Image (tube, helix red, strand yellow):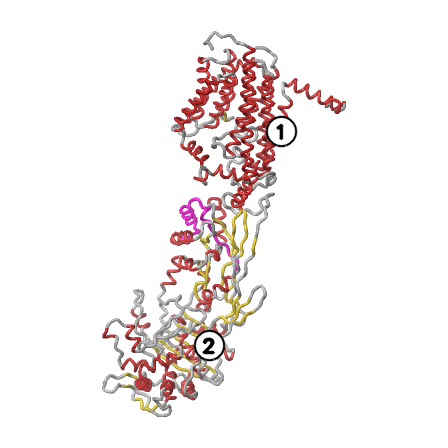
Amino acid sequence: MLREEVDGPTRRTLSYTTRLLGTLRLDGPLLIGIAAIALYSQLILFSSSGGDWESVLRGSIRLAIGATIMLTLAQLRPATLRRITPWLYGVGLVLLIVVDAIGYVGKGAQRWLDLGFIRFQPSELMKLAVPMACALLLRERALPPDLRTLGLLAAIILVPTALTIVQPDLGTGLLILFAGTLVVVLGGLSWRIIGVLAAIGVASAVIGWNFLHDYQRQRVLTLLDPQADPLGSGYHIIQSTIAIGSGGLFGKGYLQGTQGQLEFLPERTTDFVLAVIGEEFGFVGIVVLMGLYLFVVFRALFLTSQMRDTFSRLLSGSLAAIFFVYVFINAGMVSGLLPVVGVPLPLVSYGGTSMVTLLAGFGMLMSLYANRKLAG
Amino acid sequence: MSLGGRIKDFWREQHLFEQRLVLAMVIIAALSVVLLLRLGWLQLVKHGYYTELAEGNQVRIEALPAPRGVIYDRNGVILAENQPAYQLELVPEQVPDLDSTLRRLAAIGLLEEEDLDDVRRTIRSRRGFDSVPIRLRLTDEDMAKFGVHRFEFPGVDIRTRLARHYPLGEIAVHAIGYVGTISDSDLKRIDREEYAGSSTIGKVGVEAAFENVLRGRNGRREIMVNARGRSVDKLGPLQPELKRSPGEPGQDLFLTLDLEVQQVAEAWVKYRRAAVIALDPKNGEVLALVSRPGFDPNGFARGLTRSEFKLLNEDPDRPLFNRTVRGLYPPGSTIKPVVAMAGLEYGVIDPLEARFCPGYFSLPGSRHRFRDWQPRGHGNVDMVTAIAQSCDPYFYALADRLGVKRLHDFLGRFGLATETGIDIGGEKSGVLPSAEWKRKAFKRRSEQVWFPGETVIFGIGQGYMTSTPMQIAQMTAIVATRGQHPVPRVVRATRDPVTQRVTTIKPKFLPPVKLQNEAYWDNAIDGMRAVMQGGTASRAAFGAPYSIAGKTGTAQVFTVAQNARYNENAIAERLRDHAWFVAFAPIEDPKIAVVVLVENGRSGSGTAAPIARAVMDAYLLRKFVVPTVTPVTDTNNQGE
């Protein structure tokens, strides 16, 4: 049907595009989904930054850098990815320890490694390195993994997670934990063990509570009762739920969100940008964005299902799923379902290196898909 | 499931992975539904609730203070008006650290260190969301100073407000009064809602008495504020609809004061402690009301610092004290015409009967001599001469014959020791002594007895009797009009500034004073005419083209306020008698009654009478004579 409706020149353009994408090892639908989200993000960035073209420009540059990295990684062969995995993990771990040490000496929160020309966040690297390392290990083992393998996996995941959480950066730490865990679960971890681990998780959460920083604990408490401290830690959640709720079905209109424009909404360009969308574009605007996200996630999961290599499909499955985890945690915290843990809205929140990491992940995913038929 | 050595089973792994992948998709779909439910709850179900919260966030209601009514004199000269002025205002709930903010404002010189406590108290007494003025009338320099530091002071801003301005400064200040910063005690009696956005309130005089008329009704408008509470007008593309309700401007007032007469009176007592009142005896309209020294009411409207106020308040000459309605002085001889009428009313004296005045009076069986002011005495005097010469022994004897009760009752009918009811309020009532009064006034038994000698000096307005100049003016008006009893007033009309409709306020009268024989008035008035014709104040009537009735008086000073700042010279000055003069003119058709009191002025005829003459000339002849030289007399101590 479609074939018959498009005319000759259009068909030629289409086939040319397909060929180009094939050559670049990119997946068209996935690329379109990502591009749509990126466009959406620039549109809302203009509003959330209070009409600041400079922010939009910087956001676009960051997008371009991310896209370049994605394009580059897409060209790598899975074998190359596998080869660099241990190095990536090793270097990431060392840098994490260095950052923690500097933070300890400097008596303050430390996430960055200032290399002079660029500020580099090792925990971002670990978001990719941990699932890669897990997938690589599971590729060598029979699945579902046995206990010894699980022990090794636990070490691979928990050490960088712990090092990140003590920085302190609970959000990124959790994302690393999820990224690794997703690989293991996708690898076929038995339900009994998942049950046991869940129990251990709950227990350690209770114990971990005592080790949380005050502000982290406060965030959890705030979620339970935001009104307890409306001008303090509850402020973010109160203001963002007001913004979203007052948006209604169709929103107040572009640039007309009072919560955002009058700066009642904190961190409106970064972690709480979803509230600006909800306020100005309403429920419809959020549903559109969620639709784009789900399209990207399901497309990525579909691509994953086509892969035959264990490393490839575990890694890309994890990358696809973690993308949704981002969305869920961020939307959950902005709408008051989850505590404020500092997870950005993927590809839409301004700043930080998470956009680069995400696009790098998609680059790898595309590479893995493009080479799905290659063995070993 | 055995440990180790297992080989990879590709198909099994494939199957397992696909299972997990499907599971992941299901979970993702489920969580997406959860998110959408949550957002739907917020955006669709609770939309109204959150919309209200958002509006509460961005919209503040700001009061638009109504412009205060303008005050004019009887001929339309502006006495009090409004001028735009810049002031520093603070919204308490938007200030993160009040103490530090105030300290830093003081550090850059926008507040006085000594005023901080007052400012703090003011702020505490206001509602958290009201804009509280903390400094009125900023100079250009102050504004520039604040402009540089503005970002350091969230919640503090400069506002344009209409500030009260008195173009004539000290002139008629005790009649007009002034507006000042709303104080704690003011706040207790006013509705804060009505004063939201205003920083000042009428404190005394017309400004206080007609506060409700002058103030009008506040309007309000919604303003958009950002998260830091700064008002933002139409921020770029964000243009919500903001409501606005206009208020009602305050009513303008027309006073009874005649500014030109007022200015003449002011000029004559400029360097004195004195009170001058001129009124229309037929309707009680006050033509001039002077209490000196005065002060510049603009200082109060601007907001005095603590030390500025202290200086005014502790000035030994008491510039803030309205002598016309609050100053209590023995009325002295000014009441003699009325005492004479009391004698006629009660039939204890024949007005034509000449009595010998030896220069003193003694009660029967007593050797104590009540002395005349004229040591030689006045010889044979009838009633008219006694008034004209102000012969004390004549009135000592008359008072003795009348007795304290009748004297008290009769004088009481002339409104003495009763507030006159003047519309600016704040009056003292003074004392009209009687045996009963003395029983109540004194605690000690021995002091409660009324002595006959006290009746004697009561007859010449000395002793316990005290009156305000306003009471004496009212009494003079009663005599002038042969019994009409007008209530003095300063405001004659209001005008709606929108419709320009003028509403006249009707003059008020108390029940007239009726004597058994109308002719008794003539005896008193003839006496007062004689005062000006060959009597004690004849010099002051020289060349007057209209007939004047007058009466001089001196009031002995009993005590002096103890104040360490007086030097001996000054104390001596302040022990001198107060000089009184009352008059009305023309006698046939009284148009003006004047009362002059000069503290420590010593001589009613020499000091007070010429002032009254100048005031009458000003009003009746539109002839404005002001002293050409600074009237420094022997009685005035310029060192103060």
B518 shown above or below B113: below
Considering the image in quadrants, where does the C terminus of chain B appear?
bottom left
Q: Residue furthest right?
A: A8
A226 shown above or below A112: below
Q: Nearer the viewer, residue B383 or A7?
A: A7
The magenta stretch spans residue B101? yes
Q: Quadrant of residue B415?
A: bottom left
- Residue B279, image x, y percentages: 46, 76
The secondary structure type at the circle numbered 1 is helix
Tell me, yes or no, whether the two marked residues, 1 and 2, touch with CB atoms within 8 Å. Answer: no
- Residue A338, image x, y percentages: 48, 32
Magenta-highlighted residues: B83-112
Tag 1: residue type?
Ala
Tag 2: residue type?
Phe
* Disc 1 to disc 2, C-alpha distance: 88 Å
**Are discs 1 and 2 both within one chain?**
no
Which mark identifies residue B509? Answer: 2
The secondary structure type at the circle numbered 2 is strand
- Determine if residue B596 is in view: yes
- Determine if residue B530 is in view: no
The magenta stretch spans residue A276? no
- Residue A65, image x, y percentages: 58, 25
The chain letter under disc 1 is A
Q: Nearer the viewer, residue A372 or A71?
A: A372
B126 shown above or below A239: below
Which mark identifies residue B64? Answer: none
Question: 10 Å neighbourhood of mark 2: few (<14), some, or many (≥20)?
Answer: some
Q: Nearer the viewer, residue A99 or A349?
A: A349
Residue drawn at x 54%, y 9% is: B9
Mark 1 sits on what residue?
Answer: A36
Q: Quadrant of residue B355?
A: bottom left
- Residue A13, image x, y percentages: 72, 23
